[in-house]
Image (cartoon, rainbow, N blue to C red):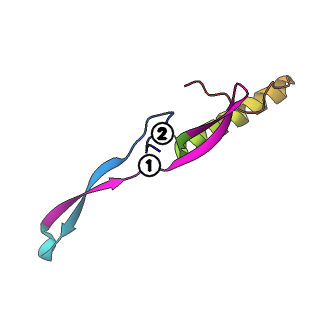
């Protein structure tokens, strides 16, 4: 499993840990990697279930889009064909 979001391409962030010695002098810098908050979710795309690796921000956006779509369909009183959100990647 790759550590990369399949929707937005978000990966790890690189940074420095700066230790401060006596008198707040910088004694050394250590490289650190902060990993992305990834989730594996199943989606129904064209009748087949597919596992997609996505970050939590993309998952949040998909949930919001699904709620907005349901609200619009409710206002217009149109029945949806499928209840799941289709992703074209």
Q: Which residues are magenta?
A: 27-52
Residue 58 appears anywhere in the view: no
Residue 49 appears anywhere in the view: yes
Can you give x and y, in whole percent of width and height, for residue 15 in the image?
A: 28, 52
Can you give x and y, in whole percent of width and height, for residue 86 in the image?
A: 67, 27
The residue sitting at 20% across, 67% down in the picture is: 19
Residue corresponding to mark 2:
5
Q: Main secondary structure of the magenta part?
A: strand
Q: Is 82 situated left or right of 58 in this image?
A: right
Q: Is 60 situated left or right of 71 in this image?
A: left
Say which quarter of the image contains residue 47.
Answer: top right
Numbered disc 1: secondary structure: loop
Q: Is 71 situated left or right of 85 in this image?
A: right
Can you give x and y, in whole percent of width and height, for residue 35 in the image?
A: 40, 52
Between residue 48 and residue 71, name the one nearer to us.
48
Dot 1 and dot 2 residues touching (CB under 8 Å): yes
Residue corresponding to mark 1:
36
Can you give x and y, in whole percent of width and height, for residue 38 in the image?
A: 51, 48
Q: Is residue 70 magenta?
A: no
Q: Is residue 42 magenta?
A: yes
Quadrant housing the C terminus: top right
Q: Relative to 3, is 84 above or below?
A: above
């Amino acid at each position: 499993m790759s550590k990369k979001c399949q929707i937005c391409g978000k990966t790890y962030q690189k940074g420095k840990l700066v230790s401060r010695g006596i008198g707040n002098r910088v004694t050394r810098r250590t490289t650190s990697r902060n990993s992305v908050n990834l989730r594996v979710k199943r989606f129904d795309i064209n009748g087949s279930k597919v596992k997609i690796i996505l970050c939590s921000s993309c998952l949040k956006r998909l949930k919001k889009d699904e709620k907005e779509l349901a609200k619009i369909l409710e206002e217009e009183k149109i029945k949806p064909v499928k209840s799941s959100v289709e992703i074209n990647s």
